[in-house]
Image: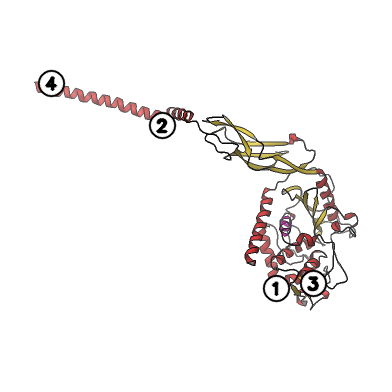
């Protein structure tokens, strides 16, 4: 039962993510702020609309953003975080020796046990590489390599096109890479799993038996220690930093019914007192929440256009409606002249017509950039007039070339028949005349 339940949850979440991805659109917005990060992706999570994109498909090193995928694999293989205890094995942590890794104190508890709940907090809050290795060792059955294979399989399952993992923590490896676009997919999926958003939005956490806290590395959500980086509307998610990756952060901003995810990667790391990824994320989220809003371009209740109807017993025209609403994120003060709707429908349609019948499509553009294409359907039933259809049928028949060919053939046959009949009569007369002689 557990196996099938996880399949159902996983499949449903993946379909949700893919539907939002495929429905997404990218529009040119006027963000005038400076951006320090080499890669940025800002997406409205309510609609899937990308509102800012800077090298979002460029392959980069993700550093500790990797731990989001590590959490996913742990979540899908551990039923009870609270009551599952894991023994801290020295063999699991030893590969970190000499790497200068960020640790969370798990490495000081070799031989002891910790709950998975404490370990995932150590991994996601403090970004402990030691916790990531212990969890990977446990779920992988003593094999970190097996766990990493599971990470890569999950990335493929989620549809990530440019992602490959070599470890569960994110320390640099030339073959350990991803993109902001792929991490949007990965993080969106993680947010559908139990506890993820709660854990990643935790600023301070105490593990069982500890008198010292696990403190978040994410200054955007830490009101006490975040300083100028703190942003009251930020929620989660994960930071990452290495010399090669630069400064990275994934966070969400939620306010007034709007939710955005911002992914910044590759901000400069030379100045240890300045985090450009935090600055970019805060500024971009503030801009989006203040200057953009959801605009309904088409609604299922409002007709888009009309089309002529042939053979109708009542109306000669019918209104066409979009099959679904079209919503997108636009600047609050956008010019309506920048919105254009292009129809792709025939010149006319024939009755009978049923309400909801497909007729054509409508494509919505903003500043000549495509937002979405939707089906147009009939807004009412239209019955066919028998008389009008009969007249039309006769007209079609008598004006068609096969009809006139048939007439010509029939005429030729009649003429031939007359000629043949005349010849027969002539011969009969000759026979009679001969007999009389």
Question: Which badge, 3 or 4, comes first in the chain's sequence?
Answer: 3
In the rendered image, which residue does mark 2 sit on?
A: 402
Q: In terms of depth relative to the viewer, which is nearer, 43 or 161?
A: 43
Which element carries disc 1, helix, strand or loop?
A: loop
Outermost residue on the left side: it is 437
In the rendered image, which residue does mark 4 sit on?
A: 433
Instruction: Report the mark closest to the observer, 2 or 3.
Output: 2
Q: Is residue 255 left or right of residue 80?
A: right
Q: Is residue 431 above or below residue 346?
A: above
Figure quadrant of the N terminus: bottom right
Question: Which badge, 4 or 2, comes first in the chain's sequence?
Answer: 2
Q: Is residue 28 among the parts visible in the rendering?
A: no
Which range is magenta?
A: 182-195
Q: Position of residue 382 (x, y in %)?
A: 55, 34
Picture residue at 85% right of the left edge, 55% below the top: 278
Q: CA distance from mark 1 to mark 3?
A: 15 Å
Label 1 crowd (10 A; few <14 / some 14-19 / many >=20): few
Q: Is residue 22 left or right of residue 425?
A: right
Q: CA distance from mark 3 to mark 4?
A: 127 Å
Residue 235 quadrant: bottom right
Question: Which badge, 2 or 3, comes first in the chain's sequence?
Answer: 3
Query: Badges 3 and 4: C-beta atoms under 8 Å apart?
Result: no
Which element carries disc 2, helix, strand or loop?
A: helix
Q: Position of residue 66 (x, y in %)?
A: 75, 62
Residue 185 quadrant: bottom right
Q: Which mark is residue 96?
A: 3
Which element carries disc 3, helix, strand or loop?
A: helix
Q: CA distance from mark 4 to mark 2?
A: 46 Å
In the rendered image, which residue does mark 1 sit on?
A: 143
């Amino acid at each position: 039962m557990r196996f099938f339940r996880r399949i159902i949850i996983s499949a449903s979440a993946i379909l949700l993510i893919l539907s939002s991805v495929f429905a997404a659109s990218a529009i040119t917005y006027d963000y005038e702020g400076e951006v320090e990060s080499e890669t940025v992706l800002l997406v409205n999570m309510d609609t899937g609309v990308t509102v800012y994109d800077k090298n979002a498909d460029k392959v980069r090193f993700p550093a500790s953003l990797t731990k989001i995928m590590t959490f996913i694999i742990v979540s899908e293989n551990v039923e009870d975080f609270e009551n599952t205890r894991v023994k801290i094995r020295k063999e699991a942590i030893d590969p970190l020796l000499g790497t200068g890794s960020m640790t969370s104190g798990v490495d000081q508890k070799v031989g002891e046990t910790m709950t998975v709940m404490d370990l995932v907090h150590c991994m996601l809050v403090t970004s402990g590489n030691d916790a990531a290795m212990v969890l990977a060792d446990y779920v992988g059955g003593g094999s970190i390599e097996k766990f990493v294979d599971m990470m890569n399989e999950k990335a493929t399952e989620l549809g990530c096109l440019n992602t490959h993992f070599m470890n569960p923590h994110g320390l640099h490896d030339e073959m350990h890479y991803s993109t902001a676009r792929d991490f949007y997919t990965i993080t969106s999926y993680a947010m559908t799993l139990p506890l993820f958003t709660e854990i990643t939005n935790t600023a301070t956490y105490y593990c069982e038996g500890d008198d010292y806290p696990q403190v978040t590395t994410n200054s955007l959500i830490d009101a006490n220690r975040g300083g100028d980086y703190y942003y009251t509307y930020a929620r989660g998610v994960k930071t990452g930093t290495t010399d090669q990756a630069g400064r990275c952060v994934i966070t969400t901003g939620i306010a007034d019914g709007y939710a955005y995810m911002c992914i910044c990667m590759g901000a400069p790391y030379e100045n240890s007192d300045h985090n450009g990824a935090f600055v970019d994320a805060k500024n971009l989220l503030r801009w989006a929440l203040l200057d953009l809003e959801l605009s309904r371009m088409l609604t299922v209740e409002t007709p888009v256009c009309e089309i002529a109807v042939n053979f109708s017993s009542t109306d000669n025209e019918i209104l066409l409606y979009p099959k679904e609403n079209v919503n997108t994120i636009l600047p609050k003060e956008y010019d309506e002249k920048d919105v254009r709707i292009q129809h792709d429908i025939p010149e006319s349609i024939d009755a009978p017509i049923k309400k909801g019948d497909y007729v054509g499509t409508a494509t919505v553009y903003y500043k000549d950039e495509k937002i979405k294409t939707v089906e147009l359907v009939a807004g009412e039933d239209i019955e066919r007039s028998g008389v009008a259809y009969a007249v039309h049928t006769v007209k079609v028949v008598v004006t068609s070339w096969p009809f006139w060919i048939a007439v010509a053939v029939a005429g030729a046959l009649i003429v031939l028949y007359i000629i043949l009949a005349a010849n027969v009569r002539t011969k009969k007369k000759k026979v009679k005349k001969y007999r009389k002689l």
